[in-house]
Amino acid sequence: MPLALLALAVGAFGIGTTEFVIMGLLPEVADDLHVSIPTAGHLVSAYALGVVIGAPLLAAVTARMSRRTVLIALMVLFVAGNALSAFAANYDYLLAARFLSGLPHGAFFGVGAVVATTMVAPERKARSVSLMFLGLTVANIVGVPAATLMGQHLGWRATFLAVSVIGLAAIASLAALIPHDHAHAPRVGLRGELAALRSLPVWLALGTTVAGFGALFSAYSYITPMLTDAAGFADGSVTLLLALFGVGATAGNLVGGRLADHSLRGTLFGGLVSLGAVLALFPLLMTTEWSAALAVVLLGVAAFVTGSPLQLMVMEKAAAGPSLASSANQAAFNLANAGGAWIGGLALAAGFGATSPAVAGALLAVLGLGVAATAWSVDRRRAVPGRERVVAAHVPEQAPALHP
């Protein structure tokens, strides 16, 4: 694997850290800026909104730029957003800075995934994407706990300054390690990228991402009350258990990348089935502490086995213009975050119990499996031998060209 993947992983590590660390620092931020914790929680939503808007928008705007330049520019924007967060004078400025920090998130992963796959042999594409995502999963094990601890002892502003330094390291790594093959503008411009999004298989792939990862976030958004109310853990144990989720996610990400290089669709289907099964077993697993800890690890493994296959599937369906579709898939991940949390919350509000969001997530995993099966069916119909000839027979012949 090329060393350039390390540069992408460093950027992913910084992005993963800044995305999730705010959740652990909400009390400190709320107290310092004199707002309520629910109001401070809007900082999480502002970042997610930035991802959803920025992913397709920035990918479209930069379609004619070299991918190497795009990656560096996106990381510059990331550093600026986090530096402005550190020096925000009040809550409104911090809200705007968090939105700005989220803008480059999706486009970085989208364009980065395209770059990663072009640097390796075809049989290693999924593995290259998983190595880039490794920075994101490791951030949940190391980056988020360390940054949260820093924020609690040195103030939340110190955390965002530290993340800015990680971003500067990523810029240096990208400039030094990304091959100059990516220093030229891609032949496919905005028109080609938009044309790829008119494909039904691309939208089915994006729908699979929304449903599949919506299943994860339906449960993960409420993992703390499950662990404390259902499994009986003390509040102080939750941080360690969330690190276990990061360990499971890292393992699932690496395994999923390796398996997807052998069978993309088989890995995707197997991952969604496993995710649905784990979530369906949550009411049983959350009855004892040891089984609850196991459930957290298994949730991370099952969910992130599908990460690389989903990203690669979208890129393959939009092979003529992959950057915009790949970035749109990152927006789909964040829509899954918001939608899954909303559906899990409905289950809780209906009084179905602390583990009911996991059961709702299991149903979403089944939905994702259905969308993936539909995509497979569409692919099979389009691959019927002779179909191309039948279609071609209905295309009128062009008039012969006139030669002088």
Image (spheres, rainbow, N blue to C red):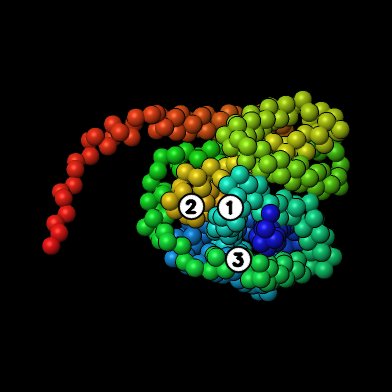
Q: Position of residue 280 (x, y in %)?
A: 68, 27
Q: Quadrant of the C terminus?
A: bottom left
The residue that label 2 is drawn on is 322
Residue 117 - label: 1
Q: Position of residue 216 (x, y in %)?
A: 65, 39
Residue at 77%, 58% in the rendered image = 143
- Does 111 sit above or below residue 73? above
- Upstream in the sequence, badge 3 or badge 2? 3
* Residue type, numbered disc 2: Pro
The residue that label 3 is drawn on is 179
Q: Are marks 3 and 1 in contact (CB under 8 Å)?
A: no
Mark 3–mark 2 Cα distance, whole angstroms, equals 19 Å
- Does 93 sit above or below residue 191? below
* Residue type, numbered disc 1: Thr
The residue lying toward the viewer, choosing from 233 and 310, is 310
- Upstream in the sequence, badge 3 or badge 1? 1
- Does 130 sit above or below residue 97? above
Q: Position of residue 31 (x, y in %)?
A: 75, 63
* Residue type, numbered disc 3: Pro
Find numbered disc 1 in the image and state the secondary structure of the residue it sits on.
helix
Find numbered disc 2 in the image and state the secondary structure of the residue it sits on.
helix
The residue lying toward the viewer, choosing from 78 and 262, is 262
